[in-house]
Amino acid sequence: MEHISDILKRQSLHNVTGTKADTGTDAVDEEPEPCPICKGARFIHPLLPTGKPDYSRVIPCRCSRQDSDGKRQSRLQSYSNLGPLTRFTFDSLSPEGRSHDPLDRERFGRAYKAVREFANRPSGWLVLAGPSGSGKTHLAAAIANQCITDNRPVFYITTADLLDHLRSSFNANSELPYDEFFEQVRNAPLLVLDDFGAQSGTPWAKEKLEQLLNHRFTNRFPTVIVTVTPIEELEERMQTRLSDADFCQVQITGSRPSALSTWGWAPEFELQKGMTFDNFDWKRRNLSLDERQNLEKAYRLAVDFATEPDGWLVFQGANGCGKTHLAAAIVNYRYQHGKPALFIVVPDFLDHLRSTFSPESKVSYDQLFESVKNAPLLVLDDLGAQTTTPWAQEKLYQVINHRYNARLATVITTNCPAEDIDSRIMTRFADHKLSVLFHIEAPDYFSGQKRSPRRTSKPR
């Protein structure tokens, strides 16, 4: 992999350049002298009537007429700065992406279609936004590789590499002056700027990027911008440019990842993973007729809810009565049918929520909290044992109140009597228009003994 300055010395042309790229050759010094017109780039900017270069267009240099197609492709490849990204083509890309989330697959499909159209005729700005791993860089590299196949120049660079080289060009020993490099990048025929928004937030970095993008926006140069930062979190001036629907288009490749998966069990739920409707025993012998009928009704409620989640289903009963099994069976049913669901044990969730305040936490408080609040189907298992502090009560109330107002499908299990549950939460459980509150009368499955619902001391 060559350093950017080496490539720029060989590939320099007026107001267009590259950075470090894999040329696939070691004998750079053995190449013939570059063309004095294009400096070895094999293409130039045509002149306007004023005599100044038209940076919005490029045409082949006369020296390129002697090049074979393979040699021309090699030069464009070297100029592009793609390096190992040459393997990222449309042929190696699924039109629907790799996500299991149907909504994300739909988003990626729309982005894929827009990217293919842009690659065939680059015009305006194309912004690819989405979380890490959602395929943004693959799409952007596929555009660049398509341009090379079509004998059109394109230049790829990450924002971090761009800023690093700009800084290094201030060094007295730099072989490429700062102004020359910056001007060449600003006027690249097609620029692909990757990892935008992940760079240092220093005033100097912001100023350089603003100068670059403002120049390309003003001159209407085609540009691809790849960002992991949500559009609404970008600088206000950048948002203003992106709102120009006549020149810019924004494609979202996927939703921001939640802190908790709604498409499969976390490793700590190995036991719940095996709890299904098929192995739920509502006919067990140690039950009286009334208890068996009661447990069968709970089973039917759970099956109906799993088939078509709507509203809330609250199971109340002693430990071991089967409420957690039924709640987990609902989640397993949804997973088997390719539908999202999230199972959390309330005390564990609150512990995780507290841990996000630690500087070492890799998940933000907001990210974790929002993923629970907005899960398409949420199971809150073992609610009640943790409501001994005002903070815990308030967090649970916020989750439950949000889901109540949004009418989001929710399953809740608790072994606490009604009087020990926060009255604000209990009133929502009792709303017959939304919630079904069912008390399971069966005894502990293992001991066969009835136990009264656990009572907890109310916080003062």
Image (tube, rainbow, N blue to C red):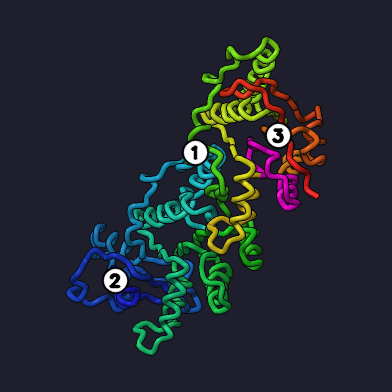
Residue 379 in magenta?
A: yes
Helix, strand or loop status at disc 1: loop
Mark sitting earlier along the chain (2/3): 2
Q: Name the residue under label 3.
A: 454
Work out whether 57 lies above or below 303: below
**Which residues make up the magenta segment?**
373-398
Which residue is pictured at 63% across the width and 55% down the height? Answer: 354
Work out whether 36 lies above or below 173: above
Residue lying furthest bottom: 172
* Residue neighbourhood size for the residue with mark 2, other residues' Cα within 10 Å, grouped as few (<14), some (14–19), many (≥20): some
> Could you say which is closer to the camera, residue 274 or residue 182?
274
> Could you say which is closer to the camera, residue 268 or residue 177?
268
Work out whether 316 lies above or below 74: above
Which residue is pictured at 55% across the width and 26% down the height? Answer: 333
> Could you say which is closer to the camera, residue 20 or residue 103?
103
* Residue neighbourhood size for the residue with mark 3, other residues' Cα within 10 Å, grouped as few (<14), some (14–19), many (≥20): some
Residue 347 in magenta?
A: no
Residue 298 in picture, x, y percent from top left: 67, 20
Say whether marks 1 and 2 touch (CB < 8 Å).
no
| Foreground disc of the pair 2, 3 | 3
Q: Taking the image as drawn, is residue 124 in sight? A: no
> Could you say which is closer to the camera, residue 87 or residue 248?
87
Amino acid tagged 2: Glu
Amino acid tagged 1: His
Residue 341 in picture, x, y percent from top left: 59, 35
* Residue neighbourhood size for the residue with mark 1, other residues' Cα within 10 Å, grouped as few (<14), some (14–19), many (≥20): few
Q: Mark 2 points at which residue?
A: 2
- Mark 2 to mark 3: distance in Å? 69 Å
Helix, strand or loop status at disc 2: loop
Residue 10 lies left or right of residue 133; in this view the side is left
Q: Name the residue under label 1.
A: 100
| Foreground disc of the pair 3, 1 | 3
